[in-house]
Structure formats: C-alpha cells, structure tokens
Amino acid sequence: MPTLWLVASLLLLAVAGFVVGRQRALSTAGGDAKELHSLPSYYGHNVAFTTLVPALGALAIWLLVQPMFIESRVSKMIPDEMAPDRPTLGLVMSDVRRVAEGLDIAVARGALSADDARSLRTEFTDVRGRLGEVGVALGADVRPEVLRAAQRYRVMSKTGNRMMGIVIGVLAIVGFAWSYMQTHKDFRARNVVEKGVLSLLILAASLAILTTIGIVLSMFFETINFFKLHNASDFFLGGTWAPNFRGDSELSILPLLWGTLYISFIALLVAVPVGLFAAIYLSEYANNAVRSFAKPLLEILAGIPTIVYGLFALLTVGPLLVNTFGKGGALGVEWMAGATSVLTAGVVMGIMLIPFVSSLSDDIINAVPQSMRDGSLGLGATKSETIRQVVMPAALPGIVGAILLAASRAIGETMIVVMGAGAIAKFSANPLESMTTITTRIVSQLTGDTDFASPETLVAFALGLTLFVLTLGLNVLALYIVRKYREQYE
C-alpha cells in the first residue's frame, strides 16, 4: 500500500475512533454529560490519539530504518572492485536505486513482467532492450552486477512496504480497540489526553535539538576524514585557497573567511541603519494609514528569491558601480575592473536584509511598555529624547537579536555572492575587487563529478563546520551583550 494511502487510512480510522469513543462515553453515562469525569470530546480524542499516534510513530521509524536496512543488505552484492571505498559505494548504490526505479516503470508500462523484474537470472541485455522500448535508459556504464542488485533492491522494497502496511494497520487497530474498551464514564480521559499532548510537545522540542546534533555530527565526522588527508595547520593558518584535485592543493580557509566577513560587514552597514530607522519611523512617528501601507511593502523584500537579488546585483548594481568607479566612469579613474565586487554583493545583500532588521526591530520597539514613554514625556522630555534615551535602550536586547539574525543570514548567503562578488579567494581591503565566501566554495567543491574521498571534496564539510562554529560564536556574543544591557532595565 502506498504511504499516502496508508496515512489517509489511519486518519479515517482516527476520525471514526473520535466519534465512537465519544458516543461510548455518553452511553455509559446514560446520555448525561454531567456524569462524565471529563468533557465528551476528551474521550473521543483519547481513542483517536491512541489509534493514530503510535501508528504514525511506527510508520516514521519504519520509513527511516527500511532504506538503511535494504541498502546494507544489497550493498553486499556489489563486488569490491566496483566499490573499493564508502564514497564510491554510495555512488554505485545511487545507480542501483535508479535502475530499480526503471524496473518499476517498465513493469507499470507492461514492457517487463513482474517475474522478470524480480528474477535474478534475467539476462542483462534482455532487460536493457525492454527498458529501451519504454524510454527508460540505464546508461552504457551499468554493469550486470548493478542490475542484479537493483532487482534485489526492488524485491526487498516491495516486501518491506507490504509488511509495513500490515504492521501499521494491526498497530492502529489494536490501539483503537484497547482505547475503546477503556472508555467509560469514570475514565480520566482529560488527564490522559493532556499528558499525551505534553509528550508530543516535548518530542517536537527534542526533534529540533536532535536534528541540530545530527547535522553537527554529520559534518564533524566528514571533517575528521578531511584532516586525515590534509594538514590542519595549512587549513587554519595558510594564506592560499587553490584546489586542483592533483594532490598538491592549498586549502586555507582564511581567504574565504575574510571575504565572508568583509561582504557581511558591508551588508550590515547598509541594512542596520536603514532597517532600524525605518522601524523607528513606523513604530513611533507613522500614523496608521502610512504604517498599514509601508510595513507590508517593506516586508515584500523578504519574499523575493535570492536568485533575483543576484540578477539585480549582476545586471543593475554592478554596471552602475562600474560606470562610477570603472574605466571611463564618472570619476575618470579605473578603480573597478568588472561588475562583480565586494561592494556589489554587499549592497544588494544589505537591501535583502533590510526587512529582517526593520520588521523584528519594529515588533520589539512596539513591545516596550507605553508607560515608559508616558513617564518620560511627563518629566518634560521631547519625543525624540524619549525614543533615544528610553525606548531604544529598553529595546536594545531585542534589536541586538535582530541584527544577529541579519548577520547570520548574510554569512550564510550564497546566490548573491556567486553572481555579485565573483569567485576569487584572496586577501584585499579594496571593496571594488572580486572575492568569494565560504558558502560559495562549499557549493563549488560539491558540484560536478568529484571524488568524495578526496580532500578537495571533503574540505566542504570542514568549511561548513567552521561556519557553524562562527555563527555559534556570534550567538554567544549577542547573548552576552543582551544580558549586560538588560540588567539596567529590569
């Protein structure tokens, strides 16, 4: 049974459980809801949750475990000469999954019988010919061993899906029957439901933490593999970024880190003053008509895709800067050779960050109690003095958080940098020269036909982990600043 249909069946069974659970509770109380320990809806929710939640939890675990189990079994069918290491095995298994999907398509279109698709004795050339008849290409480099592994993969997947449907269905029915038999007028349904909802909330909060830990660990182990192949001192202390995939690469993060921080700094120089002043005007000076028009219009900037900002940097801002600072420009000097530069990317990125700063700062400033403004005005301060000496210091912790969010967004931006800043990793203080950032190099190192066991590819994980540590340090610094200034107003 397809997963979508299985989930839909569970939802229908849960709805039925809500109805019959509520009816059973009322029937045991003689139709008088006052005789029930809890409201009638709690009894229905108890049956619905007991039917749905364990089954969905088991389904999620099954969908996570089954592919790993199947791949671990099927990968043993791949000869060692085809996959001498783990990264190569991963590429071979991608071909296995692709061929298995092709077999499913061929069976669905009638070009291949189900017996031939799952038979390990089927001739490779015969299967290739039949798949070609329905437009499913295996590729010239697919070996018979991959076909046999794909057939095995397909059989195990089909079997696992059937078993999943049976197990999940039985679990849902058992939960339905057990909770239904428990339902009576003295059953403490409200207590059970509230504890169940509390458990779900704790699980949701834990998932975010576990996901973060999983991301960090995945990068950490690949970073260890990178430092087994490349000198750590060259990575952290070297001055050159020059990957060449010939074994003598110079992979230093410092030029990339300089470009990242330089472009982010220029972006914040644009975004923070404009966004903060816009927030002050909207929250303290603008009337309702202006605010209702200007605030949504300003926040539209946050919904524009970053690729559009990249095109704006490449086609508009870059040529405009060249016409000003380039050869034959308005200043008559050649300070800028091309449209890509640190200033181009920084200005456009700053425009993108304006709504992040303005929207959050506006909400934070509006959260300052009106009594603080009234007290300042009552003591004779002007409106501008009240904003400068009362409102802004009180809102400072939240404003620091908004600026931090903008800084993290700037550090992690990719498309604007690719199209507006160039791809040159170097040290330079000239904002009119091309540079690149850590995120751009991560994309570059993982793009194309690369060997995942080489340091030139594994360096992307070391760059990602370093970027994570950098943003974590910014968060810790911001937390320190927030606590230091918050003490003055508590």
Image (tube, helix red, strand yellow):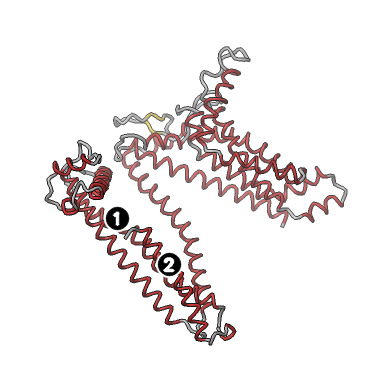
**Left or right: where does residue 298 sit relative to residue 476?**
right
**Nearer the viewer's eye, disc 2 or disc 1?**
2
Q: Work out whether residue 24 or residue 447 is closer to the camera in this orientation and state it.
A: 24
Q: Earlier in the sequence, mark 2 or mark 1?
A: 2
Q: Quadrant of residue 487?
A: bottom right
Look at the picture and state if 45 lies above or below 332: below
State the residue at coordinates (32%, 59%). 65
Q: Residue furthest front?
A: 110
Residue 289, placed above or below residue 42: above
Residue 424 in the image, given as x and y percentages of width and height: 45, 27
On the question of residue 28 being in view, the answer is yes
**Crowdedness of circle 1 by 10 Å Cα count: few (<14), some, many (20+)?**
few
Report how far apart the C-alphas of labels 2 and 1 lie in the structure.
30 Å
On residue 12, the disc is 2
Report the quarter where the C terminus lies.
bottom right
Residue 86 shows up from this direction: no
Which residue is disc 1 drawn over?
68
The spot of residue 33 in percent (x, y) is 57, 82
The image position of residue 340, as x and y in percent, is 51, 25
Name the residue rendered at 40%, 42% in the picture.
462
Could you tell me the amino acid type at mark 2?
A: Leu
